[in-house]
Image (spheres, rainbow, N blue to C red):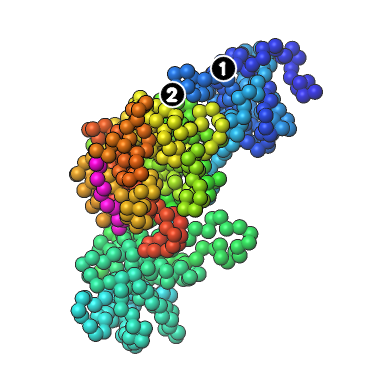
């Protein structure tokens, strides 16, 4: 009876909707499509202006059908566009139409033989990004400068930093001029408290004391450790935050902070105050979900320059916000941080901060020959995306840098499935830690606006799943990368390097002379370096040295590992140019050697393996809670900004 909706004379006997002048489209799928999303897709581009789109529930459906590209043996040539309504009828019946310049009206039917992957594959393609994974700036309390002495300050909580005794020195702690002035104002209460609590000012330690009937209500003491010339101010700020997180409003003053210590201490403070409560539901009391901490933070000092200090504060905010963005992307559940949603979040970031964004879909990646990347995502019902953001400075650039992040939003291992105790499959939402660090660095760099450097941020994002979808990756498959390299897949759980291969090639095509890839790539790196140090491999001593210096400035630990050429023997294949994994031993090195094969010899390249550092199992340092760390955002930002 629904055919009565069609205009008189519209019925046509052509059995397939590939007919170029079809105005109407009927589709019968093999599954319910009520809740699916995605644009309609055709195997061949029909003539005309626009094509079909939304379902009556304001969702969308995908209906690919019929063609295979014999050049690469995979589905190819999809064309998509959005336009008029598609009406959904129950479990998979659909009626749609597209605008035509001609007045001719025709009906075509889509056969259901290839619909199953299409409709399921589509689910999030046209969905708006989940608002909880979008970049947000201006996090935390207001931070400003107050040109006054600590003793004269009259806010709620005063933070004082104390140096520990040098090695071999005993006796009372030296309070220093500023702390001693506050102590006199408080009638010796600070010195008395230090002695009673045996506070030794060890690095990262804190103590808090309450006051009644005074202008200041609370004093927080923070230990800086023994080395006055090597104070970790980022850790000092984060340590202070552990005492400030319980506050519900009020003001905080930071005394004895000046010069080069301002940016790191503010970074540490913001990172230490961060709390990720986005996914708490109705069973969590509202008071526990509400933001905590002070309303305002003041940097106190009689000799502070407001303009210089304000600039350092803004730099700290930019970097800290980038780290927090990366943390929250890693913390996001894999049903929320999907490849399409990650791409949408990247586009939103670019819109907010003035970056250029280009998002390539599977058809466009197929046209570029990205068989290595696309093979990984074939088993998923969610489409793969290639994300390309560009920062371009005013006045042009003499340097072009590429940052390439691994973007596996979930890694099941594929047919080499992660199984059994210790497989960490429940943690595999963190396998996009490299892409999170890339986007976090993009956010920071866009706000810091470095001159004379253009930066390309590239992410090949997909899921590594298991299915019978056409082209789904199997052990033993031979796939072809963008440069024609053939790869024998002997382990589907070594998928990250397959996506990075094409992403590196794409990035180099943009004219970069330096490129860093960052990935949660190997368990072998975790075994070698633990969970506190990231591994680095590089083909350039100069570039490696600059990365090491950037990591020291940023307060992140990096250790250079060898690129042992002889180990590539383990990657040789009897049938293809190379295999994707080698022997058990030296797995982190062979993974780096694999990636090096996709880097031109004239490019300075470094590979960062953050498998151990992208996730924290408990609070430590500037990490206030278990979860994503945002590791390497600070290092990558320092590399770009400071050259």
The N terminus is located in which quarter?
Answer: top right
Q: Nearer the viewer, residue 417 or 23?
A: 417
Give coordinates of residue 513: x percent, y percent. Answer: 25, 35
Give coordinates of residue 442: x percent, y percent. Answer: 37, 45
Give coordinates of residue 323: x percent, y percent. Answer: 39, 53
288 part of magenta stretch: no
Q: Residues within 10 Å of mark 2 (few under 14, many from 20)?
A: few
Q: Residue at x 43, y 75 (%)?
A: 156
Total marks in image:
2
Left/right of residue 633 with respect to residue 539 in the rendered view: right
564 part of magenta stretch: yes
Q: Nearer the viewer, residue 341 or 256?
A: 341
Position of 488 relative to 540 (above/below): above
Q: Identify the mark nearer the N-term, 2 or 1.
A: 1
Residue under numbered circle 1? 46
Magenta part of the chain = 553-565
Residue under numbered circle 2? 367
Corner quadrant of residue 589: top left
Q: Residue at x 55, y 40 (%)?
A: 128
Q: Residue at x 41, y 80 (%)?
A: 209
Left/right of residue 545 with respect to residue 139 in the rendered view: left
Front label number (2 vs 1): 2
Q: Nearer the viewer, residue 500 or 13?
A: 500
Q: Most extreme residue toward the right, as rendered?
A: 1
Left/right of residue 304 with respect to residue 44 in the rendered view: left
Label 1: element kind: loop
Distance between mark 2 and mark 1 Cα atoms: 18 Å
Q: Residues within 10 Å of mark 1 (few under 14, many from 20)?
A: some
Label 2: element kind: helix
Residue 318 visible in the displayed image:
no
């Amino acid at each position: 009876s629904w055919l009565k909706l069609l205009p008189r004379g519209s019925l046509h006997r052509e059995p397939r909707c590939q007919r170029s002048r079809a105005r109407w489209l009927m589709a019968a799928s093999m599954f319910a499509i009520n809740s699916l999303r995605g644009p309609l897709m055709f195997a061949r581009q029909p003539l005309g202006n626009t094509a079909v789109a939304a379902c009556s529930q304001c969702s969308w459906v995908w209906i690919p059908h019929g063609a295979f590209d014999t050049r690469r043996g995979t589905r190819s040539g999809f064309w998509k566009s959005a336009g008029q309504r598609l009406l959904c009828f129950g479990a998979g019946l659909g009626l749609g139409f597209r605008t035509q310049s001609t007045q001719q009206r025709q009906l075509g039917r889509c056969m259901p033989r290839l619909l199953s992957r299409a409709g399921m594959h589509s689910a999030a393609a046209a969905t708006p990004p989940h608002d909880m994974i979008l970049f947000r700036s201006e996090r935390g309390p207001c931070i400003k400068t107050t040109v006054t002495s600590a003793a004269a300050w009259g806010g709620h909580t005063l933070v004082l930093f104390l140096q520990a005794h040098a090695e071999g020195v005993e006796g009372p702690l030296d309070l220093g001029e500023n702390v001693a002035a506050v102590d006199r104002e408080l009638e010796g209460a600070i010195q008395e408290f230090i002695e009673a609590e045996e506070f030794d000012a060890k690095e990262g330690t804190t103590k808090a004391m309450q006051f009644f009937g005074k202008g200041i209500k609370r004093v927080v003491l923070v230990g800086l450790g023994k080395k006055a010339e090597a104070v970790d101010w980022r850790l000092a700020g984060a340590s202070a935050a552990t005492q400030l997180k319980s506050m519900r409003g009020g003001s905080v003053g930071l005394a004895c902070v000046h010069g080069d210590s301002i940016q790191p201490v503010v970074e540490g403070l913001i990172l230490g105050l961060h709390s990720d409560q986005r996914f708490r539901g109705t069973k969590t009391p509202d008071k526990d979900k509400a933001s905590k901490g002070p309303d305002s933070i003041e940097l106190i000092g009689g000799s502070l320059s407001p303009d210089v200090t304000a600039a350092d504060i803004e730099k700290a905010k930019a970097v800290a916000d980038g780290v927090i963005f990366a943390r929250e992307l890693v913390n996001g559940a894999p049903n929320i941080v999907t490849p399409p949603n990650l791409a949408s979040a990247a586009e939103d970031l670019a819109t907010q901060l003035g970056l250029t964004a280009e998002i390539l879909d599977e058809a466009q990646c197929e046209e570029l020959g990205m068989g290595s990347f696309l093979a990984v995502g074939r088993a998923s019902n969610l489409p793969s995306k290639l994300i390309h953001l560009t920062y371009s400075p005013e006045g042009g650039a003499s340097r072009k840098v590429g940052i390439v992040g691994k973007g596996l939003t979930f890694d099941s291992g594929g047919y080499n499935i992660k199984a059994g105790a210790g497989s960490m499959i429940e943690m595999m939402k963190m396998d996009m830690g490299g892409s999170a660090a890339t986007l976090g660095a993009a956010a920071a760099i866009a706000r810091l606006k470095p001159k004379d450097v253009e930066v390309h941020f590239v992410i090949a994002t997909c899921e590594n799943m298991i299915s019978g979808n056409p082209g789904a990756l199997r052990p033993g498959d031979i796939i072809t990368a963008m440069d024609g390299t053939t790869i024998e897949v002997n382990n589907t759980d070594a998928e990250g390097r397959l996506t990075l291969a094409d992403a590196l090639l794409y990035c180099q095509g943009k004219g970069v002379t330096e490129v860093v890839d960052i990935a949660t790539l190997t368990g072998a790196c975790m075994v070698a370096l633990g969970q506190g140090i990231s591994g680095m491999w590089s083909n350039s001593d100069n570039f490696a040295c600059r990365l090491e210096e950037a990591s020291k400035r940023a307060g992140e630990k990096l250790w250079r590992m060898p690129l042992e050429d002889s180990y590539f023997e383990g990657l040789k294949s009897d049938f293809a140019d190379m295999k994707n994994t080698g022997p058990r031993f030296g797995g982190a090195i062979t993974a780096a050697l694999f990636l090096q094969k996709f880097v031109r010899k004239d490019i300075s390249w470094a590979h960062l393996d953050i498998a151990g550092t992208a996730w924290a199992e408990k609070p430590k340092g500037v990490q206030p809670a278990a979860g994503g760390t945002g590791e390497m955002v600070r290092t990558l930002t320092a590399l770009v900004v400071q050259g």
